[in-house]
Image (cartoon, grey):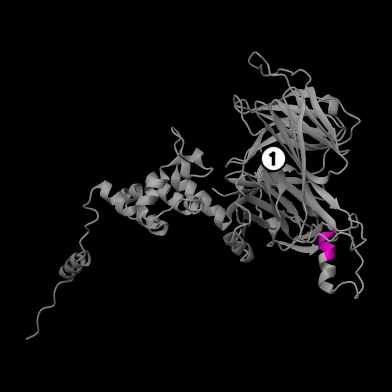
Amino acid sequence: MVKRAREEADGIDESHSKRFKSSVVDRLSRLSDELILRVLSYLPVAQLVVCQRLSRKYQALAGDDQIWKQQYYERFVRPRAKKIPGVKEDGSADESIRLASKASRWLGEEHLIKRGVKMNWKKQYKLRHNWTRGSAVVSEIPVAEEATDTDGLRAWSAREEEKMVAKISFAPAVTGSPPTALAIDPRISNGTSKIAVGFESGAFSVYVLDHAKARFHCSYSHVASSNGVISAISISWPYVVTMTATQLLSLYAFKQPTAPAVDQDILDPPRLLHSLKSSTIWPPLSTSLRAMEDSITISVAYALPTYLSGWTVGLQEVKVSPAGELIESRLAAAISRHYRPLIFSFSPLMQHLSAPSAAAATASTSRELRQIHSKPTSLSYTHPYLLVSHPDNTLTIYLVNSTAESLTIGAGSRLWGHTSSVSGAHVGDRGKAVSVSTRGDELRVWELEGGFASSAAKKRLSGLKMSVRIRPESRHTRTKNSTVRDKSSVTQTLSTRGTGSFATEQRLDDTSELTLTRGWVGFDEENVVVLKEQSRGGQALVVYDFT
C-alpha cells in the first residue's frame, strides 16, 4: 500500500523550522558588554571589522574607541617605543593596554591623548593605515585655467567641498613684480594665520588670513630693494627672515601691538635686527626660523659645490638675540662618500660631462661621475632631517646633530625608488617625507625616522621597504566655485622623457601639452598637495586625501 505523500505546506513548514535550528550555542552574546569588550580587545583588526557587520550591538562594541586606541598604539607607536633604551616589554595585550594610556610612551604623538580632546581612534587608525599603503583619493583644484596677468594671493580649501576660501590682490607697492617665495606661520593666533610673500623686486609683504571671516588683508608691504630677488622667506611671528639671490640674509622684527589688533590694522615698519652676507650659499636652499625667549635661531640649508668633485649640502645656523646682537654662527657640510678631491678637473657647474678615457675610468665610474656632478633638484630641511633630491631618480637623507658645542651633518644615505627624475621633496620633523617626480605621475611616501645608523635601519634600507608609491583613486566633485576633475585624465598619458630636468607629456586626445611639477609639494596629517603646471599657463593643485 502506497503511503500518502505529505502535503507541500507541511514540508515547507518543517524544513523552514529545521533550517534555522542551530546546534551551536551563542555564549558570547549572553556575556555583559564589559566582558565582550574584553574579548574583542584580543582580536586583530580584520576580525574587528567583521564583528562590526554582525549587528548594531556588535557594531558599537567593536567600534569602541579604547579598542581602536590600543590597536593604533600596538601598530604605529609601540614599535617606536620598543627602541627606548632600558625599557623591557613582555609583549602581552594587557601591557599594551597599560602602556597605551601613558602619554610618555607616545613619542611625539602626545597631542592625540590630550585631556579634553575627543579622538575618533578608528578614523585615526584608518588614516595611518592608508598612509602606510599609499592609498589616497585624488582630485584637482583648478587654480588657473590659463595664463593671466592677474596677480594676488588666494587660499583654497582641500576638504570635501573644495573651493576658494579667500583672495586678495597684491599691494600696489609690488604690482608688476612676480612673487618668488612664500611662507606661512605654523602657529594660528586668534583664528588668524600670517603669510609672508617675497617678490622678484626684493620687496616682501605680510598678509593675515581670518579663518572665520574667510578673507585676507595686507598688514605690511616692504619697499623694493636693490639686494635682489628674494629666493627664500620664513616667518615665525613677530620675526621674518629673507634670503636674496645675492646671498644676503636679513632678519626683521615687527613690533607687537599693545592693544588687540583691529581687522584692517597696518603694522609699523619692522626693525632690521641683523643681516649677513654669504658667498657660499647656492640654490636650492631652505630656510627655517625658531624663536625663543632669549634668542632667535635661523637655519639655512643649501647646496654646496665641492670644487673638483661635484655637489654636497651645507647648513648654517645663526643665533641672534632679541636685541639684534649676533650670538653665534656655525657652519657644517656633508662630505659624500663619493667625494674625490684633486682627481678630476671637471667644473661642478657643468651639467653634461664628456666620457672619460678608458684608462681613466670604467663605464660604471663614468655613470657615477655624471651623478655626483649633478646639482640637487630640491632640498628640504626640518630638524633633524635634511632631504635632497637628485636628477638621477634618487634622494639622499642626512641627519643633522645640533648641540651646544657643535653642529654636524651625518653621512648621507641614498634612497632609491623613483623611476624618473625627482623635482621636489618635503620632509617632516618625525621623518615622514613625500617626493614627487618631474612629470607628477609618481608620488612616494617615505618613513625615514631615526635615519639609517642602526643595523635594523640599514637592513630596511637595503630591502627598499622605507617607501611606498601612492596609488590614487579618482573622484568626481563639482562645487559651486570650482570643478574638481578626474585625475585619470592626467595619469593616462603617453610620456616621453626630455632633456635636463623636464619631461614631455602627450595626452591621449588631440591636445598635446607639457605638464610639469616645479617641485612644490607639501603635506599634513591628512593630505598631500602638489602644484601642477601646464605649458599653456594653466595651474592646478593636485590633492591626495588619505582620510
On the picture, is 4 further left or further right than 142?
Answer: left
Q: Nearer the viewer, residue 14 or 178?
A: 178
Could you tell me which quadrant the N terminus lies in?
A: bottom left
On the picture, is 423 further left or further right than 130?
Answer: right
Q: Judge whether residue 152 can be spotted in this image.
A: no
Residue that extends furthest to the front in the rendered view of this protein: 405
Q: Residue placed at 78% from the left, 59% from the top?
A: 505
Which portion, as a residue range, is magenta?
369-373
Q: Nearer the viewer, residue 523 or 306?
A: 306
Image height of 393 relative to 179, above or below: below
Q: Can you give x and y, in whole percent of width and height, for residue 349 in the image?
A: 90, 54
Which residue type carries mark 1?
Answer: Glu
Image height of 349 relative to 214, above or below: below
Residue that extends furthest to the bottom in the rendered view of this protein: 1
Circle 1 residue: 405
On the picture, is 311 further left or further right than 454?
Answer: right
Q: Can you give x and y, in whole percent of width and height, for residue 409 in the image?
A: 72, 49
